[in-house]
Image: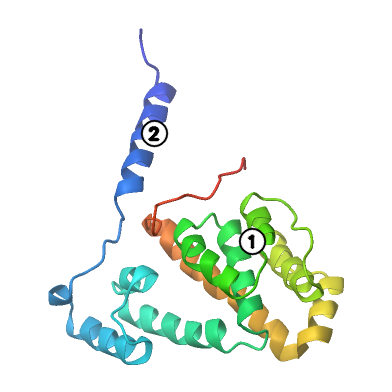
């Protein structure tokens, strides 16, 4: 049987997909590989986070200035934003799901549950369904974040509800969380960063 170009391309893509599961394009650097700039960035990271760069930050060490600026933004948006930690984790999960980012999801799934988000709501997001039983605050965050991620803008109705509840600082922070975790998701998707823990992957949906 003679294979045409499309068959060959399809097989090549399958093989590439298999390789991508096992290998990151940007594997973590060991400390003895660091340049002076990377060593300084790693020291600054460890001073704040109390451990060496890990996960997406280890990957970002290839560009240490990006890594430490990303870390600094995350220090605020994840831990001290105007919408609170539980809603922040909720917005992070929505972002991870919209980008099919397995590592981001695997890290923040248990944190969202710990923060008090109902597991049924989280699993609905994972499966691509509209979550039933959300609190009023969760509905505001869900609508705002989904619109921003899917449609690249926020409707007047969703913006007004979010501003009324969280204030102008809150809407800036909420968009910032979506943007920051989109940045990390884009970097990890680009690098084929492997999932964490048991390696479970989010369901992929048709484009």
Disc 1 secondary structure class: helix
Q: Of 10 and 83, which appears nearest the observer?
A: 83
Image mark for residue 80:
none
When asked about the image quadrant of residue 161, the answer is bottom right
Give me the residue at 38% from left, 79% from top.
66
Instruction: Tell me where residue 191 appears, x and y as whole percent.
Output: 37, 58
Disc 1 + disc 2, Cβ < 8 Å: no
Q: Distance of mark 1 from mark 2, alpha carbons? A: 34 Å
Instruction: Tell me where residue 166 appears, x and y as whole percent.
Output: 76, 86
When asked about the image quadrant of residue 42, the answer is bottom left
Identity of the residue furthest to the top in this view: 1
Q: Is label 1 or label 2 in front?
A: 1
Instruction: Tell me where residue 169 appears, x and y as whole percent.
Output: 70, 90
* In this rendering, position of residue 3 left or right of residue 27: right
Looking at the rendered image, the quarter that the N terminus falls into is top left
Instruction: Tell me where residue 33 appears, x and y as whole percent.
Output: 15, 73
Number of residue marks: 2
Identity of the residue furthest to the right in this view: 157
Q: Which color scheme did the rendering employ for the protein?
A: rainbow
When asked about the image quadrant of residue 81, the answer is bottom right
Q: Which residue is mark 2?
A: 14
Identify the mark nearer the N-term, 1 or 2. 2
73 w.r.t. 129: above or below: below
Give me the residue at 53% from left, 50% from top.
202
Q: Which residue is mark 1?
A: 119
Disc 2 secondary structure class: helix
86 w.r.t. 16: above or below: below
Q: Residues within 10 Å of mark 2 (few under 14, many from 20)?
A: few
Q: Residues within 10 Å of mark 1 (few under 14, many from 20)?
A: some
Looking at the rendered image, the quarter that the C terminus falls into is top right
């Amino acid at each position: 049987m003679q294979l045409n170009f499309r068959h060959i391309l399809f097989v090549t893509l399958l093989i590439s997909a298999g390789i991508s599961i096992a290998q990151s394009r940007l594997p973590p650097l060991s400390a003895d590989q660091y340049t002076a700039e990377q060593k300084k960035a790693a020291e600054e990271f460890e001073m704040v986070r109390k451990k060496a760069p890990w996960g997406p930050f280890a990957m970002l060490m290839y560009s240490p200035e990006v890594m430490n600026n990303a870390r600094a933004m995350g220090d605020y948006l994840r831990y001290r934003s105007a919408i609170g930690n539980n809603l922040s984790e909720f917005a992070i999960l929505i972002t991870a799901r919209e980008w099919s980012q397995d590592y981001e999801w695997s890290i923040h799934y248990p944190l969202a549950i710990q923060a008090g988000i109902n597991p049924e709501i989280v699993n609905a997001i994972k499966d691509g369904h509209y979550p039933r039983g959300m609190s009023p605050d969760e509905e505001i965050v869900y609508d705002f974040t989904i619109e921003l991620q899917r449609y690249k803008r926020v409707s007047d109705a969703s913006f007004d509800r979010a501003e009324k509840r969280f204030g102008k600082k809150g809407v800036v922070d909420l968009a910032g969380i979506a943007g920051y975790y989109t940045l990390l998701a884009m970097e990890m998707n680009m690098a084929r960063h492997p999932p964490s823990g048991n390696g479970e992957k989010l369901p992929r949906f048709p484009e």
